[in-house]
Image (spheres, rainbow, N blue to C red):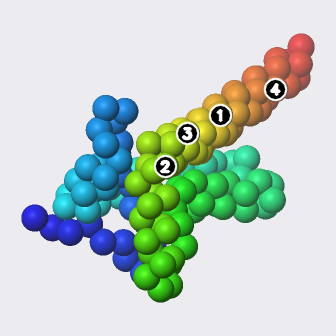
Amino acid sequence: MPVNEPSPANPFFLVPHTPDEPILDAVERGLMSAPAPLEQLSTLGDLVQHDPFFAEQLAALHTTWEVRPQPAQGWLARLRLRLAWWLLGPELAQVTTTHAALVRVIDSLTAHLDDERMARTRLEARLAALERTR
């Protein structure tokens, strides 16, 4: 079975998680399966091109949604980290799932806003054309 390792250009990978599956099982399944391409994530349109701050914040959301601790140095720090993940695994999985869902909702709302703006532009152009014909 292939091991799902992040590449240097892509430092993380997606692990689909179901509520009834333990988080460690989901991570193991993700490591042993082929990586889900991040290109499947929603691409953002016209709104992002006109607002650099918004684009920067959306990029930050896409790269920081996952709750992941910093690497631990030393045996005591590793023990503390493992204990924390063992005790808080379900809660951290819920937080990560919520963060991922919020990023997808923001992407979806942005795409809908882009669609609405394009429809409004087409309607304004049609109304302007009707005014010229009168």
Q: Is residue 61 visible?
A: yes
- Image quadrant holding the N terminus, namely bottom left
Q: Is residue 128 above or below residue 40?
A: above
Is tag 1's residue or tag 4's residue first in the polypeptide sequence?
1
The residue under the point 70% across, 33% down is: 113
Is tag 3's residue or tag 1's residue first in the polypeptide sequence?
3
Given this view, does label 4 or label 2 mark the residue nearer the observer? 2
Task: Assess disc 3: are there few (<14), some (14-19) or many (≥20) residues with their C-alpha within 10 Å of its C-alpha.
Answer: some
Task: Assess disc 2: are there few (<14), some (14-19) or many (≥20) residues with their C-alpha within 10 Å of its C-alpha.
Answer: few
Task: Assess disc 1: are there few (<14), some (14-19) or many (≥20) residues with their C-alpha within 10 Å of its C-alpha.
Answer: few
Given this view, does label 2 or label 3 mark the residue nearer the observer? 2
Q: Position of residue 18 (x, y in %)?
A: 34, 36
In three-dimensional space, the C-alpha distance between marks 4 and 2, rounded to whole angstroms, equals 53 Å
Given this view, does label 3 or label 4 mark the residue nearer the observer? 3
Q: Which residue is mark 2?
A: 88
The residue under the point 44% across, 61% down is: 83
Using the rendered view, name the quadrant where residue 70 is placed.
Answer: bottom right
Q: Which residue is mark 1?
A: 109
Q: Is residue 39 above or below residue 118?
A: below
Check disc 1 and give the amino acid type. Answer: Leu
SS under mark 4: helix
The residue under the point 66% across, 61% down is: 60
Q: Which mark is on residue 98?
A: 3
In three-dimensional space, the C-alpha distance between marks 2 and 1, rounded to whole angstroms, equals 31 Å
Q: Position of residue 84 (x, y in %)?
A: 49, 58
SS under mark 2: helix
Asked if the residue under mark 4 is in contact with the one under mark 1, i.e. CB atoms within 8 Å, the reply is: no
Task: Assess disc 4: are there few (<14), some (14-19) or many (≥20) residues with their C-alpha within 10 Å of its C-alpha.
Answer: few
In three-dimensional space, the C-alpha distance between marks 3 and 4, rounded to whole angstroms, equals 38 Å
